[in-house]
Image: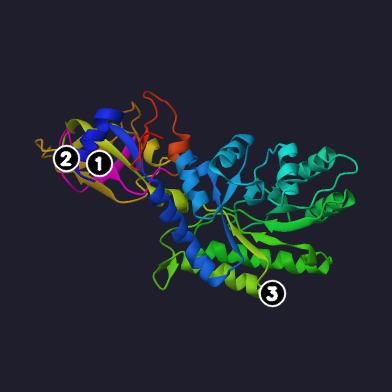
Amino acid sequence: MDLRTLQTLEARWGAGFYLTSRERMLRSCRAVCIPFERRYPAFRLAYSFKTCSLPPLLEAIHTAGAWAEITSEREYALAVQAGFADDSMVYNGPFKDMGLALRIAAAGGVVNLDSPWEAARLCQALPMGKSCPGVGLRCNFDVDGRPSRFGIPVDHGTLEDTVRLLMGRGIPVRGLHCHIKSRDMAGWRIKARRMSELVHRWRGLGLAGGLDYLDFGGGFRFEAGAGGEPFGGYADLLADTMRELFRKEKMKLIIEPGAAVAERAMDFAARVVNLNQVGDTCFATLAGTICDISAVRRRPPGAVVRIPGGGPVCTARRTVLAGFTCMEDDILCEDFPEKVAVGDYILFRNTGAYSSALRSEFIRECPPVVCLDDALL
C-alpha cells in the first residue's frame, strides 16, 4: 500500500479506515480449510459471522465452500443474503429463536443447544405430531481452570438428563459441540481428549451410533502449524482424534473459526494527525483508536508499518502511537521503532476481526471499511 493510494482513499473516506477485499477473504478462508481437507475429507469450516459480517466478505466465504456459523436472526438474514442455504448453517448461542432453530434443523443444518433450558424450550416449541431430525449439544467441561458459562455441564448427570428430555420428545442428538477459549495447542489437546471421552461415554449409553458430527468450535492461531504449514498442528490433532474414534471417515468434523479467517483479510490504516513531545517521548496521535485494532484493547495483533508522508519527523528518543480519544490508555503501540511525522500513515496488518464489528461511536464515528475490489462496504 503506497502513500498516493492512501491519500486518495482518505480524500473519499476519511483519515482512518479498514482495508480488505473479497479475494483476500477467500484466500484466508482457503488457508484454514486446506490443511484440514487434506487430512480429513469429511470436514466443514463454519465461519463465525459475529467476527465480521460485512456482506461482500460473507459472499467470499460462501464462494470458498464454507458454512455459516450464526447466533441470531439478524445473522441468519445476512447468511441468506450471502447465498447460504439452511442446510449449510450452524446455529449457536445461548439465546436462540426456537422457530428458526427448528427450521434450520428440519433443513439438515446444525443446531447446537447451549443449555438444558434451551432443550426444554425446543421441546415446547416443537408442534405435536411434528418431528425434528435432531440437534447437537454444546458441552461444558474444564480446560484451563476457568469454568465457562456456556454449554451443558458434562458432570453430575446434567448431560444425560438433557438427552433424556430431548429423546422423550422424539428429538435425537446428532452431534457434540465444544467451544472453549483456548488457542494454544496444550488447550486443544485437552479439548480433543475430553471430546473423545464424551464419545466413549455416549457409546456406554448406546447413543454413539446416532452421532453425525463433532464440532470443535473455534479458537485458532494462524501461527500454529506443523512442518511450517499454518493450522497444520490443529488439523493433525483433530483428524487423528476423529480417525481414532470413528473407523469410517464419514463422521463430520466441524470447526468454527472467526478471527483466524477475518484477521488475515483486513488491515487498518490511520494517518498521523498530531505530535506531542513530552520529555523524551513523542506521542503521535492517529486517526484511529485502540478499539479499531483490538476489540479487547490489546496491542497490535499483526505487524505495524509506517508509510512516510514526507513531513519533518519528531526527534524524541521514544515514539508512542496513540488514539484520538481522551482516554489515557488509548495506546495502539507503546514503543514504535521509527520516528514519525504528521501526514505519515500507520498500517496495522491483519486486524479488524471483532473490532470492526464491536467498535462504538465513542467521540468519532466508526471507521469505514474499504473493499479494494470496488467501494465502501
Amino acid of disc 2: Val
Identify the mark at residue 94; answer none if there is no mark.
none
Q: How many angstroms separate mark 2 from mark 3 (CA)?
A: 59 Å
Q: State the residue in front, 329 or 62.
A: 62
* Residue 156 in view, yes or no: no
At 56% from the left and 44% from the top, the residue drawn is 83
Q: In this figure, which residue is indicated by the disc labeled 3?
A: 248
- Mark 1 and mark 2 residues within 8 Å of each other at the beta carbon: yes
Q: SS class of the residue under badge 3?
A: loop
Q: In this figure, which residue is indicated by the disc labeled 1?
A: 346
* Residue 264 in view, yes or no: yes
193 left or right, relative to 162: left
Q: State the scheme by which the image is colored.
A: rainbow
**Magenta span includes 341:** yes
Q: SS class of the residue under badge 1?
A: strand
**Magenta span includes 331:** yes
Q: How many angstroms separate mark 1 from mark 3 (CA)?
A: 51 Å
Q: State the residue in front, 43 or 290.
A: 43
Q: State the residue in front, 24 or 307.
A: 24
- Mark 2 and mark 3 residues within 8 Å of each other at the beta carbon: no
Which sits earlier in the primary sequence, circle 1 or circle 3? 3
Q: Nearer the viewer, mark 1 or mark 2?
A: 1
Which sits earlier in the primary sequence, circle 2 or circle 3? 3
Q: Residue 257, percent across and down? A: 52, 53
Q: In this figure, which residue is indicated by the disc labeled 2?
A: 340
134 left or right, relative to 273: right
Q: Which image quadrant for residue 141?
A: bottom right
Amino acid of disc 1: Ile
At 63% from the left and 48% from the top, the residue drawn is 89
- State which region is magenta: 330-352
